[in-house]
Image (spheres, helix red, strand yellow):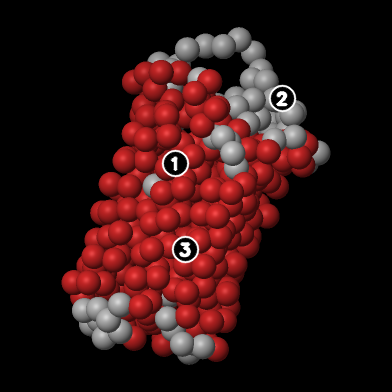
Amino acid sequence: MTTLQVSGPVVEPSPVKGWLAVLAVTLGIFALMTSELLPVGLLTPIGSALHVSEGTAGLMVTVPGLVAAVSAPLVTVATGKVDRRLVLAVLIGLVGAANLASAFATSFAVVLVARFLIGISVGGFWSLAGGIALRLVPARHVTRATAVIFGGVEAASVLGVPTGTLIGDFSGWRTAFAAVGILGLTSLACMIFLMPKVAPEATLTFADLPKVFRANAALRVGIAMTFLVITGHFVAYTFVRPVLQADGVEPGMIGALLLAFGVAGICGNFLAGALITKRLRQTAVGIAAILTTAMVLLAVTDHDVYTAGAILILWGLGYGAVPVTFQTWILDAAPHATEAASSLYVSMFNLSIALGALFGGLAVDSFATAGVLWIGGGLALLALLVLLLGTGGAGNSRRAAH
């Protein structure tokens, strides 16, 4: 395995300053994920306003996902000698500007250009932020700080996407994009004033990425389960609004149901944070099983708003556990090459978002809307089989060793 050592003497970070920086990064992750996933709750009104189908509107999720998959390693390598605070600040500022551009867009092409820029930010920011808790807080706080940072992902589901959906329903989708743009600029200010300079690790090259991947079986398993779980989730979740409306759920209730999904996601995030120290592999298995069950139930059950809400809560519990569990798996698999491993993980995560939205869009335009649930459930089931049949003790042995 390629070992990337931290340059210079080891200095114990200040807990107070470190946690302020962690909160700034958490707000950035919240703004990023809200930006990336905001179209999920607004596909129908955006498509109608800009005269494109719901499947085509799904490109608003596909484009940033594909770009982020490429930008994660590119930004990590290209900024190898640059202060991490500066890089993160530039990327989150770009998110704010791109969302404001979307708010004033007069054509779908302009929106896609803005989504392209958001993809650059998502890939670069996340690949650097994934392991940055190691550099901000004392060692005894790293696990908790990582859970807090990735709680920003679930907070985006709880507050960002549902609130954006509600704003879109009552004030129009342009207002929702403008609000997220302002959120991005607020994150930029917090990054500048609350985060210390973070010196880069030893210079990372493109050659380091395949070396880390080839030398580490646990990392390969983590990348594989990320592809299957995230693609499966976003095949279905990107089109959850038309799925629910096709089953008779009133459009005005969609925001409330997404809020229930997000609240469950917060619970799943912190539940997983308590379990993964000793039961990392079992937690990953549970995630795949829950997601499979939830998507199949939503496909086969005749439901009203209450049963749909119950299934979405189950789904949210499972997906809420994904970011902190999968990121921890990746960091444990490559503890001496965190930026290289994180960039590979973020690349696959966002590629999977893009592929999920793309395949889901094709399925929605070509087949019954509920078909996305069967595809998503099938991919989650494959992830479960990979974990049960192909991993052995991967993950747990590393946690036990710490």
Q: Residue 261's x, y, as percent?
A: 29, 60
In the picture, the disc for residue 318 is: none
Q: Residue 91's x, y, as percent?
A: 54, 48
First along the sequence among labels 2 and 1: 2
In the picture, the disc for residue 3 is: 2
Q: Is residue 227 above or below residue 109?
A: above
Frontmost of labels 1 and 3 is: 1
- Point out the residue furthest to the left here: 306
- For this rendering, which residue is in front, 389 or 277? 389
Residue 119: in sight, yes or no?
A: no
Residue drawn 55% across and 89% down? Answer: 366
Q: Residue 211's x, y, as percent?
A: 78, 37
Instruction: Report the amino acid beneath label 1.
Output: Gln
Frontmost of labels 3 and 2 is: 3
- In terms of secondary structure, where does tag 2 sit? loop
List the residue tagged with mark 3. 233
Residue drawn 53% across and 38% down? Answer: 329
- In terms of secondary structure, where does tag 1 sit? helix
- For this rendering, which residue is in front, 278 or 222? 278
- Mark 1 near mark 3, Cβ–Cβ under 8 Å? no
> Is 120 situated left or right of 50 in this image?
right
Residue 278 falls in image quadrant: top left
Q: Residue 38's x, y, as percent?
A: 40, 65
Instruction: Report the amino acid beneath label 3.
Output: His
Callout 3 crowding tier (Cα within 10 Å): few <14, some 14–19, many ≥20: many
Callout 2 crowding tier (Cα within 10 Å): few <14, some 14–19, many ≥20: some
List the residue tagged with mark 1. 282
